[in-house]
Amino acid sequence: MRDAVGTVQSLLVLGGTSEIAAATARRLVADRARRVVLAARDPAGAEPLAGELRSAGATDVEAVRFDATDFDSHRAFVEEVFDRHGDIDCVLVAFGLLGDQDELMRDEAAAVGVVQSNYAGAVSVSVPLVERLRVQGHGTIVYLSSVAGERARKSNFVYGSSKAGLDAFAQGLGDALQGSGVQVMVVRPGFVRTKMTAGLEEAPLATDADAVAEAIATGLRRSADTVWVPAPLRIVMSALRHLPRPVFRRLDI
């Protein structure tokens, strides 16, 4: 359970090799999180971060296997994590694929893979997660969404549509959980400089993983429902969302 000043003490990261997830785990450990579970398709890939978190003061860090698209394994995975580690204050849902839009227009399996990872995988694991969090009576699920989900753009509409689905699911889930003690926070970053975006042209208001992590930590302290990174993107996306379609189609975005 969070401490007397509301600081997260236990963290489950789904997508433990993500750069944003790693930055967030570092930030929360600096804020006195002491138990961390890093869940990744390749747990060995998360071991360097696990060692770093132990050196930074975390007393119980474990890297475990989790596959977002292995839907049949999700319930057993959640049960094992909670049975082994007890209460979890915060779950960070940070896994996902970007994909190359040109390839996704030609390869239906690749397009479905993006949707399954980013949206269906999150929905699948969230159901048993919510059950355990409701039983313990507290906890926050942080969903790493994207401004790309605010309005699907021709340059990355497969990715954008998957994030739109995740964002809508998370918002509805948060509303449904009101009064249960369990909260949902949706994080909407813009362009983040990571390995996933390496080689792509930067969008305006580009940011980095550490800035997203700081925004997540601040949002958790404030019990925020929605976090934009950086904050001015809320205004930018509001304007884009309301542009007439003929105008929007002409934009090179």
Image: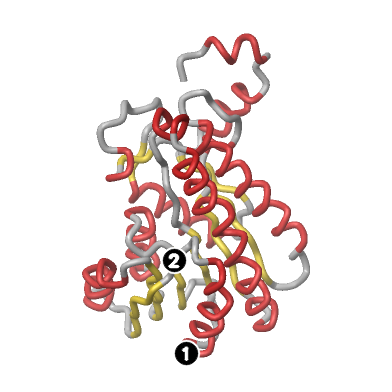
Give the distance between the C-alpha atoms of the residues marked 2 and 1, in whole angstroms.
19 Å
Kindly identify the residue that appears in the image at 25 percent across and 32 percent down. 199
Q: Secondary structure at mark 2?
A: loop
Tell me the colour scheme of the image. Answer: secondary structure
Place of residue 56 in the rendered image (x, y in percent of width and height, measured from the top left) = 25, 73
- Label 2 sits on residue: 67
Rendered view: 67 above or below 195:
below
Quarter of the figure with the N terminus:
bottom right
What amino acid does circle 1 point to? Arg
What amino acid does circle 2 point to? Asp
Horizontally, residue 53 falls left or right of residue 90, namely: left
The quarter of the displayed image where residue 74 is located: bottom right
Which one is nearer the viewer's eye here, 31 or 236?
A: 236
Question: Which numbered disc flags the more N-terminal residue, 2 or 1?
Answer: 2
Horizontally, residue 44 falls left or right of residue 80, namely: left
Residue 64: which disc?
none
Whether residue 149 appears in this view of the structure is yes
Q: Secondary structure at mark 1?
A: helix
Nearer the viewer's eye, disc 2 or disc 1?
2
Which one is nearer the viewer's eye here, 96 or 38?
A: 96
Which one is nearer the viewer's eye here, 46 or 106?
A: 106
